[in-house]
């Protein structure tokens, strides 16, 4: 009778230990699954952000390759992308690609594919946009220092121009030899290609943009 009781206690103890081991194994399993899911989610998010950057460059390269006349040149010149370039979450603020500084809310193809076909750069795009599509040209306007542009060239700032001043979402670093290098850049595309110039002036074939050197 005593042996039977001992066996029952051993069986209960064995089941209790098995339950504890099962709980430990399940806990480790769920922890592993949670870590794996978090890691996978993070990797997917990182991949998506990198893919958006690559897609923007690839699409701009395709538009560059397809340039055959001024209509297709206008397509290349007028295309802008919004990309979280520095992968910090929000699409705002400034970022850079190689030499060039730009705002994440407004990244032109002629910055992502500079000197397309060795003849279509920001200067050519400024001229062709101002000449043929001034309605599209104003989308690029904003003073290099983030100030409101006088797009009408009349010396006054109206409501539409005030709206243009905040569309980029950032103040690009501008060239100033008296500032520390981290606060300045001669590759602020708006300043380098004179995109703070009213369309009436920028469309003039005799207009010469003099960038900072």
Image (spheres, rainbow, N blue to C red):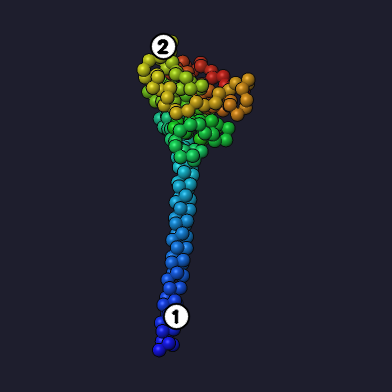
Secondary structure type for disc 1? helix
Q: Residue furthest bottom?
A: 1
Residue sitting at 54 percent across and 19 percent down? 209
Numbered disc in front, either 2 or 1: 1
Among the 4 quarters of the image, the one containing residue 92: top left
Residue 151 relative to residue 100: left or right: left
Q: Which mark is residue 156?
A: 2
- Find residue 179 and report its horizontal and vertical position in percent: 61, 22
Residue 91 relative to residue 212: left or right: left
- Judge by depth and name the residue closer to the eye, 4 or 180: 4
- Find residue 170 and report its horizontal and vertical position in percent: 47, 28
Secondary structure type for disc 2? loop
- Find residue 1 and report its horizontal and vertical position in percent: 40, 89
| Quarter of the rendering occupied by the C terminus | top right
Q: Residue furthest left?
A: 159
Name which of mark 2 and mark 1 comes first in the sequence: 1
- Judge by depth and name the residue closer to the eye, 104 or 117: 104
- Mark 2–mark 1 Cα distance, whole angstroms, equals 94 Å
Q: Does residue 55 lie above or below 120 as drawn?
A: below
- Find residue 176 and report its horizontal and vertical position in percent: 60, 21
Q: Does residue 7 lie above or below 69 as drawn?
A: below
In the rendered image, which residue does mark 1 sit on? Answer: 10
Q: Residue furthest front?
A: 2
Residue sitting at 44 percent across and 35 percent down? 91
Among the 4 quarters of the image, the one containing residue 70: top left
Q: Is residue 115 something that shows in the picture? A: no
Q: Does residue 35 lie above or below 56 as drawn?
A: below
- Judge by depth and name the residue closer to the eye, 157 or 151: 157
Residue sitting at 46 percent across and 66 percent down? 24
Q: Which mark is residue 187?
A: none
């Amino acid at each position: 009778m005593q042996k039977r009781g001992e066996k029952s206690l051993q069986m209960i103890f064995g089941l209790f230990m098995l339950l504890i081991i099962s709980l430990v194994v399940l806990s480790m399993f769920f922890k592993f699954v949670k870590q794996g899911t978090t890691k996978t989610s993070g990797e997917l998010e990182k991949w998506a952000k990198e893919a958006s950057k690559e897609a923007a460059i690839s699409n701009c390269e395709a538009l560059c390759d397809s340039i055959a006349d001024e209509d297709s040149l206008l397509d290349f010149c007028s295309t802008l992308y919004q990309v979280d370039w520095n992968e910090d979450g929000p699409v705002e603020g400034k970022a850079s690609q190689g030499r060039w500084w730009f705002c994440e809310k407004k990244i032109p193809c002629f910055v992502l594919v500079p000197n397309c076909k060795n003849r279509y750069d920001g200067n050519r795009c400024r001229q062709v946009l101002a000449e043929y599509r001034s309605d599209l040209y104003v989308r690029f306007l904003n003073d290099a220092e983030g100030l409101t542009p006088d797009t009408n060239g009349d010396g006054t700032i109206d409501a539409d121009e005030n709206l243009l001043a905040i569309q980029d979402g950032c103040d690009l670093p501008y060239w100033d030899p008296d500032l520390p290098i981290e606060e300045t850049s001669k590759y602020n595309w708006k300043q380098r290609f004179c995109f703070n110039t009213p369309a009436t002036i920028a469309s003039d074939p005799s207009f010469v943009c003099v960038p900072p050197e």
